[in-house]
Image (cartoon, rainbow, N blue to C red):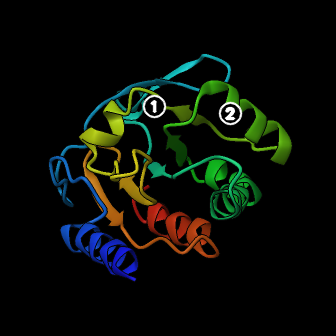
Amino acid sequence: MKMYFLMISVLLSIFSLGLFIKGDNLKVGDLAPDFKLPDADGKFYSLSEYRGKKPVVIYFYPKADTPGCTKQACGIRDKWSEFEKNGIQVLGISVDSREALKNFEEKYSLNFPLLSDETKEVCKTYGVLNSLAFASRVTFIIDKEGKIAHIIEKVNVETHSKEVLDFAMKLK
């Protein structure tokens, strides 16, 4: 019984300290930190390549091929033509390996870039690396000038793609 209460106390302590490791707290209006990350095929993407050209949705997600992450990615896949038609780039970022991303993309016919942050540096920079060393589910919508226009910290995977598309379309 003592062990049970000890475990409960430890869990409550962890949650009271916060599950998230917050790096620099980015906020709306800040210049979004640049990065250079590979996709599943080894092609590198950087945020700066879109500056002055188009809005960018950067969504961080915990783990490829898990139920919530799959729903979120498939929602974007299904609306991809609308993102393209409206000149909006979407980049999904997780700490998964390129191989895991490749399997995820192939299994669900994903048609947009998923980037691998195996070093976790980008997740740390954006303040989304949680205490379990996975990315938290957080989305940043970046305007054409490279500034953070909107942050979604409580993502609903069912409505995520519509929500980010609607917001990003206002930035065109």
Looking at the rendered structure, the secondary structure element under dot 2 is helix
The mark nearer the N terminus, 1 or 2, is 2
The picture quadrant where one finds residue 158 is: bottom right
Where residue 50 sits in the image (x, y, percent)?
42, 33
Where residue 108 sits in the image (x, y, percent)?
82, 48
Residue drawn at (44%, 43%), measured in percent from left and top?
Answer: 54
Left or right: residue 41 versus residue 53 is right
| Disc marking residue 117 | 1
Where residue 37 sits in the image (x, y, percent)?
46, 25
Q: Assess disc 1: are there few (<14), some (14-19) or many (≥20) residues with their C-alpha within 10 Å of its C-alpha.
A: many
| Disc marking residue 73 | none
Residue drawn at (37%, 55%), measured in percent from left and top?
Answer: 140
Q: Quadrant of the C terminus?
A: bottom left
Kind of residue sitting beneath label 2: Ala
Left or right: residue 149 versus residue 81 is left
Query: Extreme front residue here?
Result: 1
Residue drawn at (70%, 57%), measured in percent from left and top?
Answer: 70
Looking at the rendered structure, the secondary structure element under dot 1 is loop
Q: Is residue 162 above or below residue 127?
A: below
> How much space separates mark 1 and mark 2, taking CA atoms?
12 Å
| Disc marking residue 100 | 2
Left or right: residue 23 versus residue 57 is left
Q: Quadrant of the N terminus?
A: bottom left
Residue drawn at (36%, 72%), measured in percent from left and top?
Answer: 7
